[in-house]
Image (tube, helix red, strand yellow):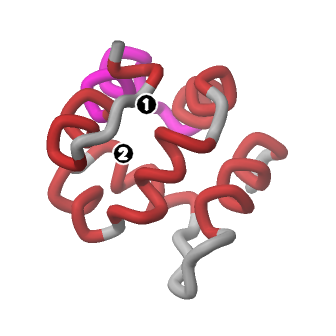
């Protein structure tokens, strides 16, 4: 069942892109760097446009620990050249 947090996150990350991710696809991208690179736009939107508190809520609701989330932000930020709040 999709939660309010997931609805807000997906509306944000999918808005500018023609190939939307569903909740499980985004979870897979956060958990797997190779998948994140294949969906760079939405993943960048997740880490850059979604508030850190909502990122944490979405991750928690989908079984992603805070440590894994922070590592994903750091790794994706290093690869993309972007700076993300959770990577600090």
At x 57% / y 68%, what residue is drawn?
Answer: 22
- Name the one closer to the observer, 8 or 1: 8
Report, in whole angstroms, how far the alpha carbon at label 1 lies from the one at label 2: 8 Å
Of mark 1 and mark 2, the one earlier in the sequence is 2
The x and y percentages for residue 82 are 32, 39
Corner quadrant of residue 2 = bottom right
At x 35% / y 67%, what residue is drawn?
Answer: 39
Which residue in the structure is indicated by mark 2?
30
Q: Nearer the viewer, mark 1 or mark 2?
A: 2
Main secondary structure of the magenta stretch: helix
Quadrant location of the C terminus in the rendered image: top left
User: Is 59 displayed left or right of 73 in the figure?
Assistant: right
Q: Is mark 2 on a helix, strand or loop?
A: helix
Q: Is mark 1 on a helix, strand or loop?
A: loop
On residue 64, the disc is 1
**Residue that sits furthest to the bottom in the current view:** 18
Labels 1 and 2 touching (C-beta < 8 A)? yes
Number of other residues with Cα within 10 Å of mark 1, as a class: few under 14, some 14 to 19, many 20 or more:
some
Region of the chain picked out in magenta, as a range: 62-72
Relative vertical location of residue 46 with respect to residue 74 in this rendering, above or below: below
User: Is 73 displayed left or right of 56 in the figure?
Assistant: left
- Determine if the magenta segment contains residue 71: yes
At x 51% / y 40%, what residue is drawn?
Answer: 48
At x 48% / y 32%, what residue is drawn?
Answer: 63
- Name the one closer to the observer, 30 or 2: 30
Count of marks, rendered view: 2
- Name the one closer to the observer, 38 or 65: 38
Number of other residues with Cα within 10 Å of mark 2, as a class: few under 14, some 14 to 19, many 20 or more:
many
């Amino acid at each position: 069942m999709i939660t309010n947090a997931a609805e807000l996150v997906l509306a944000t990350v999918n808005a500018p892109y023609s190939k939307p991710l569903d909740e499980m696809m985004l979870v897979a991208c956060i958990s797997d760097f190779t998948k994140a690179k294949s969906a760079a736009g939405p993943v960048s939107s997740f880490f850059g446009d979604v508030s850190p508190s909502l990122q944490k809520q979405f991750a928690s609701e989908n079984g992603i620990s805070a440590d894994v989330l922070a590592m994903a932000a750091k790794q994706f930020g290093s690869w993309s050249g972007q700076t993300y709040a959770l990577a600090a």
